[in-house]
Image (tube, rainbow, N blue to C red):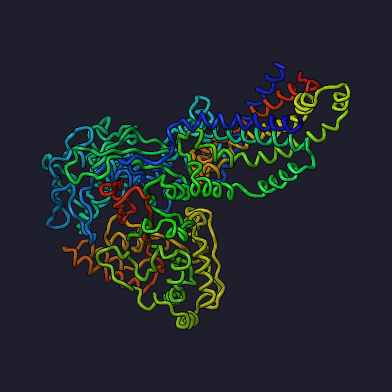
Amino acid sequence: MRVRRLAAWTALPLAVTLGLAACGSGGDGGSGGSGSDTVSIQIAEPQHLVPTNTTETAGNQVISGLFSPLVDYDAQNKPVEVAAESVTSTDNKVWTIKLKDGFTFHNGEKVKSDNYINAWNYGAYAPNGQGGSYFFEKIAGYEDLQGKQPKAKTLSGLKKLDDLTFQVTLGAPYIDFKTMLGYNAFYPLPDAAFSAPGVLKADYEQAPIGQGPFKMKGTWQHDSKIDIERYDAYPLDKPKSKNIEFRIYQQLTAAYADLLADNLDVLPTIPTENLSTAQTDLGDRYQTSPMSSFQFLAFPTFDKDFANPDVRKAISMAIDRDEITKSIFKNSQAPARSFVSPVLPGYRENTAGAAGEFNPTEAKKLYQAAGGPAKIVISYNGDGGHKDWVDATANQLKANLGVEVVGSAEPKFADLLNKVEKKQPVGMFRLGWVMDYPSMEDYLGPLYTTNGSSNYYGYSNPDFDRLVKEGSAAATQDEAIKKYQQAEDILAKDMPVIPLRFGENVFGHSSKVKNVEMDLFQRVNLVKVEAAS
Amino acid sequence: MFRYILRRLLQMVLAFLGTTLIVYALMFAGQGDPIQALAGERPVTEAQRAYLTEKYHLDATGIGGFFYRYFDYVRSLLQGDLGQSLTGRQIGDILQQAWPVTVKLALIALAVAVIFGVTAGVIAGIRRAGIFDNSTLVLTLLVLGIPTIVLAPLAQYFLGVKWQLFPPTAGAEPNFYALLLPGIVLGSLSLATALRLTRTSVAENLRADYVRTARSKGLVKRRIVSVHVLRNSLIPVVTFLGVELGNLMSGAIITEGVFNIPGVGFNLFRGIRTEDGPLVVGIVSVLVVVYLVSNLLVDVLYAVLDPRIRYE
């Protein structure tokens, strides 16, 4: 009696639950596996999909499928024409860009030189607040488009020659302009994107129309996914996969779980938490490829403790880079002993020279002779997963230099920058850099010149500035690289930053896809990836 | 009763305005540099900084700036406009997308807690000190001891990846089955508490005078338990579950992150991380309404469960 009563008590809720579950399982399978002609790729929620406003990886990945760049990079990372027929200049100041015939936008419009001119003018015009506007600052007339009430609405340096040719006049000769054109800010926009001249339609980025190998399928499903499909009228290499689904994840670890269950096809970044097991989990589906990121420690110039270059060199020599990349990063990053990334034309190994070699005895001797501080602080932003390696570095310095070293976390990157700008004592601090286009200038200029956009540490050396300037104004690439390398040699002498690590793409894919390749910009090659059937 | 509910609803308006003010003030005070937070580690161009500063009145600082921005916010709020997030999305749209999936998740979690927690609690209460009672005690202690941040990835790894019983993540438009595992994980904590509460309450009431009376007048035991004991034992449980519904909706940050559900918890986390004041205030305002309404429901339910309780 008693048992039956209890059975009834438990049976009822169980039946209800099972019934509910049965209702649910009739659904569409939700996030279940993708069909054979669809490849799913993890991205974060993009901030913007307007080419001139896209500066982060997720947005860049999506529009790299929707648009075709003027130039792309070959195996040596030299620019090769894609949507452009030719990009030429006699003096590196006036450039003539001739477009390939046969490109159309996804709405059928023929691609004309006006589409480029309009898009670039829109991007450069300050009141539009485009994140990529600084790419146009080398074009003549850029200053007139800045400020609250700009003097002009269009760049004076852009001139249409005919429907497929236009001329770009720069403010000063720039050897790497052609290389720069590979960045996504230089994509064209169709007439349909504008509601009036210079006014972008508010909903354009919900379903961007481009001229690339893929077109939008539906609209941007915020926080959920972006679907794109093959564009049949694309004149160049046709994509192997018919559909691509960019699936939006908030956390890489969630995407990693889906990858293990074959629910997701490509994960461009294996989360740090899973690095130690990923190789066993994925086998040969765990892959690495070069990319451009560069991690370093910077010395604030306003801090007298670090004013002597010998102190900086000694600290650099006391860090065992190999040990940290091995034990903390599981070799997913490579030790850095130069000031520019190895992916660049003009890169040389070990430009930091002796200062880049691990040598604790010499380091201690040099440190004491130069009168280094008795206490070193290493500041970092606590939201970026930097604690482990900063602590390891601090321990190495403590052991090898015999001084007190502590890591100090700021909540966010902005807080760290804020303190540096106010010249508060932060000690050494960590920074990272990812290039926009493969040129040594894209490292040397922003990071080390006096007015560099990311030179937060206030390094300034007139000789260095001059060499970089001469390099970018050089007549040939070889000459430019020679100047850039001379500039890099100055960095080795001054040691304004300590190079620590170069990054790599560490990615994985499911058993359902093949030919997964990633480029220097952390983007999956969408044309090559295909379903393995 | 009607007058009571009306009075409570009027109080809600005041509470709602008060919380928006407090939350807005907190976000305002804690604000560092939202533009840099948005750009990550990239340098922000002057043009973009100027554009965003003007668009979101980020240059209005200090006490005066606070009231200027707060009243600006309230003014558009009264017109039904929740404002824009820093990436230019309408916050109203974000909430519209986020709420349904979070509500579904919370209801599943609540259902799990009620169905399993209350049922097991009643059984444990009736068979006090038996094997069932003791084993549930150990199990609930275990569940209460494991934080969601451990439980969720473990459940995902074993049930989703290893044995493939459930999809490992749910995504933005999940079906019931995909939400079941996150729902169970989210509900497990409330389940344990509901179970303990019900068990104690049932065990206590079984020894109450009115139960003895009912038994001596010859009522069937099933009727005693299901009508007399259960109804009286549910009062503390209902209180707990009412408050818990609000918690389940706002407290799903970890679960939503692990199972990739772009609901309220995730958006709240994103808003805080990117220092997106309007987004956080918008979400919290709606959460406050949820709390207030569920509290009112609990109070009304008291009267239903216990006729001695009356509202004027």
Asked where in the image residue A246 lies, by quadrant, the reply is: top left
Q: Quadrant of residue B239?
A: top right
User: Is A84 rendered above or below residue B105?
Assistant: below
Residue at the spot 19% in from the left edge and 57% down from the top edge: A173
**Residue in the foreground of this view, choosing between A226 and B237:** B237
Please tell me which residue is depicted at 20% across the width and 39% down the height of the picture.
A115
Q: Is residue A91 left or right of residue A198?
A: left
Q: Quadrant of the C terminus of chain B?
A: top right
Can residue A451 be spotted in the picture? no
Q: What x and y, as percent, mark residue A291?
A: 33, 59
Q: Residue at x 49, y 69 (%)?
A: A393
Residue extending farthest front = A1
* Residue in the foreground of this view, choosing between B18 and A108: A108
A470 horizontally vs B115: left or right: left
Q: Position of residue B69 (x, y in %)?
A: 52, 36
Q: Is residue B84 above or below residue B47?
A: above
Quarter location, residue A470: bottom left
> In the rendered view of the protein, which quadrant contains the N terminus of chain B?
top right
User: In the figure, is residue B10 to the left or right of A96?
Assistant: right
Q: Position of residue B244 (x, y in %)?
A: 65, 35
Image spot of residue A238 (x, y percent): 21, 44
The total number of labels drawn is 0
Residue B217 seen:
yes
Residue A328 shown left or right of residue A113 in the figure: right
